[in-house]
Image: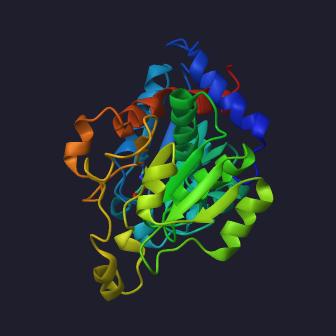
Amino acid sequence: MREMSREEIEHILNTAERAEFRGDMLQGRVMCTLFFEPSTRTRLSFEAAMKRLGGEVVGFSKPGAASLSKGENLTDTIRTVSCYSDVIVLRHPREGAARLAAEVSDVPVINAGDGSNQHPTQALTDLYTIRKEHGTLRVRVAMVGDLKYARTVRSLGHGLAKFGARIMLSSPPGLEMSPELMEELEGMGARVEVCSLEEAVERAEVLYVTRIQKERFPDPEEYRKVQGAYRITPELLEGAPQNLVVLHPLPRVDEISPEVDHTPRARYFHQVRNSIPVRMAVLALLLGVV
Ligand code: NCD
């Protein structure tokens, strides 16, 4: 997200919105999904998007069954797979894995999450949803939760900053956004401030809630200290501005109570739905058919 221009982002969102897709656009093309970390939405929505465009899908979601478990390195795997497919979707626990893959691949590589670094197609989905809800990306977005390890926060932050958004940050102690990233976002055009959860709810137009990324903690004891530290409930949202919507990249654990699901503010399942046209647009643009 860091390198994409505002115009490029808008072009993807507009392509997704126009939804002028045909079911045979990617006929005969093959997408390969390589998922080295668990996923429900990202992998399945990429597969669904490819199939809706008439394409084929190969890949794995259990790396234990692939040759990597025999000691093959990632670059050899990517070189191999790029001989079989027209586009690769890669999720990997190591930061920079997608960039490395793109360097050795003959076909485009889509980053579906690299460690706690980036998750650009989730950010595009988030931006698409925000624009749909508010008509603009120059909004006040409160990011709540794990601002240290959540890659969705980093990618969305970069995207929002380019549109001059106001970013409010609320996290449990120890999970703050790094000062370097805050500075970077400001340098890109965002106005960034730290606030409490209550302030976030009072003033934001979007509440972007994240899961505490338990699997990225070096020490399980540290996770236990922040477990359950925040929870979004209908009561908490009572006094919030009329237009506040709640987003979450999902999966959620306990940070949004299920009672919020039935309120008109809950937009996280709309967000899930929006990922299909966005990923269809990314695939169609990368493969040059729109
Ligand atoms: C996120 C991820 O994998 O980073 N999930 C997703 O792709 N929607 C968020 C998370 O795991 O908390």
Q: Is residue 114 visible?
A: no
- Drawn side of residue 235 relative to residue 69, left or right: left
Residue 43 percent coordinates (x, y): 41, 44
Q: Height in image: 44 above or below 159? A: above
Residue that protrudes farthest toward the left in the picture: 259
- Drawn side of residue 210 relative to residue 164, left or right: left
User: How many circles with numbers are drawn on the protein?
Assistant: 0
- Drawn side of residue 269 relative to residue 78, left or right: left
Residue 261 percent coordinates (x, y): 25, 39
Q: Nearer the viewer, residue 170 or 274?
A: 170
Coloring scheme used: rainbow
Residue 184 percent coordinates (x, y): 74, 65
Q: Nearer the viewer, residue 119 or 25?
A: 119
Q: Nearer the viewer, residue 268 or 199?
A: 199
- Identity of the residue drawn at 56% across and 33% down: 128
Quarter-wise, where is residue 21 in the image? Answer: top right
- Identity of the residue drawn at 33% across and 77% down: 226
Q: Is residue 161 visible?
A: yes
Residue 33 percent coordinates (x, y): 47, 45
Quarter of the image where ligand 1 sits = bottom left
Q: Nearer the viewer, residue 158 or 116?
A: 158
- Identity of the residue drawn at 52% across and 41% down: 126
- Identity of the residue drawn at 76% across and 39% down: 6
Quarter-wise, where is residue 222 in the image? Answer: bottom left
* Quadrant (top left/top right/bottom left/bottom right) for the C terminus: top right
Q: Height in image: 73 above or below 231? A: below
Q: Height in image: 62 above or below 121? A: below
